[in-house]
């Protein structure tokens, strides 16, 4: 097995994995070209067939200093949890004149901080006269290994033996607890610290190549002249982009040693496995209300944008297209963005740009789809898309000129919660669910 991890450069140099590139190698690799001039021409070639690759060239792109890319994705802090152990009602432990705390064990104690207020939407609170008046609100006064200490803000005021106490209703297992804002005193200048720790992940840049042999293609290697595509050139680019599209969607990240070539081969991981969210949607018997529920799942509970892209397999696209739309959710105009022609679907939760992806059908996902927030998808490029001329005559191989197209890149989802897999189910009577 090789002792070092090297990959051949496209201009005769050497690229070293897992270490920063030297100044000499960076200069040889044309540094800083986040969007190579060739990219601007590539995006004009059948963009509808490769929407993921198209978005990656028109959106966020970063230079990768090595074949393996390490990145951080940040999620928002969990906003709600549930009661894990039954909490009996009553006055609890008296902490002050009107603070009576209860130890509440939840499914995620660590999301709560001292001084936060907590809404219990399914349990009613009381006003000063003892009448039910809206949902119960709690105040976090402490934390321990046994649970979170919370005191009712609008509990029921009870008088016993001449003393007034505040009683809290019982909280059964499964009761929802929703984090709200912090409540400080007038003299408070500090509050418990808040840290959002990013989650580290990695992906591999895959070296994509395509070789075209035709004497007239020597012009491609000269970037100052530009590209004058022939039918053969265009066909080669389309085939290369379709292959990249499948890797960017459904690829599996790996690094294998090829004993024949005496080098490592890097495989990129697709975005299908990078999101944390899956939504099951029935393809047979799909209704407008189910589509509204899907939009709710896609646009709520995260900090993503209100305009996202739905790439759909043919069966899912057919089911969506057969719906009769109303004012609740309606099919809008055709929109052209990033060189792609989308069908616009508008709901009260947000707008989806919908497109049938032939790659989903080819990869066995005709019932499925993927909702992408393009603002949170980043392309890492180790070797920008470029063309290298090979003189096969001088090397004595063939009496032709050849051009090799190369790119080493990968896609990452920087905020996994803003994207969502759609798993289409075909059984009748099935309902939509979120995982």
Image (cartoon, rainbow, N blue to C red):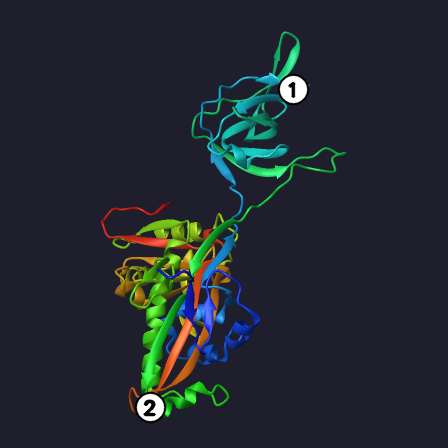
Q: Spatial distance from mark 2 to mark 1, Cα to Cα?
A: 89 Å
Viewer-proximal residue among 118 and 6: 6
- In this view, which residue lies farthest toward the right? 187
* Position in image of residue 327 (x %, y %): 42, 58
Name the quarter where the C terminus is drawn: top left
- Mark 2: few/some/many CA within 10 Å (<14, 14-19, 20+): few
Q: Is residue 411 left or right of residue 194?
A: left
Name the quarter where the N terminus is drawn: bottom left
Disc 2 marks which residue? 393
- In this view, which residue lies farthest toward the left? 427
Q: Residue at x 60, y 30 (%)?
A: 140
Q: Residue at x 64, y 37 (%)?
A: 182
Viewer-proximal residue among 118 and 270: 270
- Residue 46 marker: none
Q: Is residue 427 left or right of residue 211?
A: left
Q: Nearer the viewer, mark 2 or mark 1?
A: 2
Disc 1 marks which residue? 95
* Position in image of residue 230 (x %, y %): 35, 88
Q: Residue at x 36, y 92 (%)?
A: 216
* Position in image of residue 257 (x %, y %): 33, 61
The answer to whether 195 is drawn above or below residue 229 in the figure is above
What secondary structure is found at the residue carrying circle 2? loop
* Position in image of residue 117 (x %, y %): 60, 34
The answer to whether 328 is drawn above or below residue 221 in the figure is above
What secondary structure is found at the residue carrying circle 1? loop
């Amino acid at each position: 097995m090789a002792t070092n991890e090297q990959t051949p450069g496209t201009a005769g140099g050497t690229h070293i994995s897992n270490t920063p590139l030297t100044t000499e190698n960076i200069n040889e690799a044309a540094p800083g070209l986040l969007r190579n001039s060739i990219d601007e021409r590539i995006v004009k070639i059948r963009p509808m067939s490769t929407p993921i690759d198209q978005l990656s060239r028109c959106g966020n792109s970063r230079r990768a200093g090595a074949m393996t890319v390490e990145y951080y994705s940040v999620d928002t802090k969990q906003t709600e949890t549930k009661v894990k152990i039954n909490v009996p009602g009553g006055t609890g432990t008296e902490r002050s004149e009107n603070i009576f705390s209860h130890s509440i064990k939840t499914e995620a104690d660590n999301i709560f901080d001292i001084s936060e207020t907590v809404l219990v939407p399914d349990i009613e609170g009381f006003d000063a006269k003892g009448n039910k008046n809206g949902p119960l609100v709690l105040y976090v006064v402490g934390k321990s290994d046994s649970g979170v200490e919370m005191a009712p803000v609008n509990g029921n005021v009870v008088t016993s033996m001449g003393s007034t106490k505040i009683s809290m209703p019982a909280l059964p297992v499964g009761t929802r607890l929703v984090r709200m804002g912090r409540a400080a005193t007038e003299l408070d200048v500090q509050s418990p610290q808040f840290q959002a720790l990013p989650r580290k992940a990695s992906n591999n840049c895959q070296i994509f190549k395509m070789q075209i042999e035709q004497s007239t293609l020597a012009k491609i290697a000269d970037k100052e002249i530009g590209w004058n595509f022939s039918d053969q050139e265009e066909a080669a680019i389309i085939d290369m982009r379709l292959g990249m599209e499948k890797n960017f969607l459904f690829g599996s990240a790996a690094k294998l040693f090829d004993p024949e070539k005496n080098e490592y081969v890097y495989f990129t991981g697709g975005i299908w496995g990078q999101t944390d969210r899956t939504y099951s949607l029935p393809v047979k018997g799909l209704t407008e209300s189910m589509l509204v529920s899907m939009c709710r799942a896609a646009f709520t509970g995260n900090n993503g944008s209100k305009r996202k892209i739905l790439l759909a397999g043919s069966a899912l696209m057919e089911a969506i297209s057969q719906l009769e739309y109303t004012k609740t959710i309606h099919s809008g105009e055709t929109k052209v963005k990033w060189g792609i022609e989308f069908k616009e679907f508008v709901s009260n939760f947000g707008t989806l740009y919908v497109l049938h992806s032939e790659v989903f059908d080819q990869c066995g996902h005709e019932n499925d789809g993927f909702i992408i927030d393009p603002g949170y998808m980043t392309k890492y490029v180790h070797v920008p898309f470029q063309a290298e001329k090979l003189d096969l005559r001088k090397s004595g191989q063939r009496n032709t000129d050849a051009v090799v197209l190369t790119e080493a890149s990968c896609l990452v989802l920087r905020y996994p919660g803003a994207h969502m897999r759609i798993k289409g189910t075909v059984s009748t009577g099935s309902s939509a669910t979120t995982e």
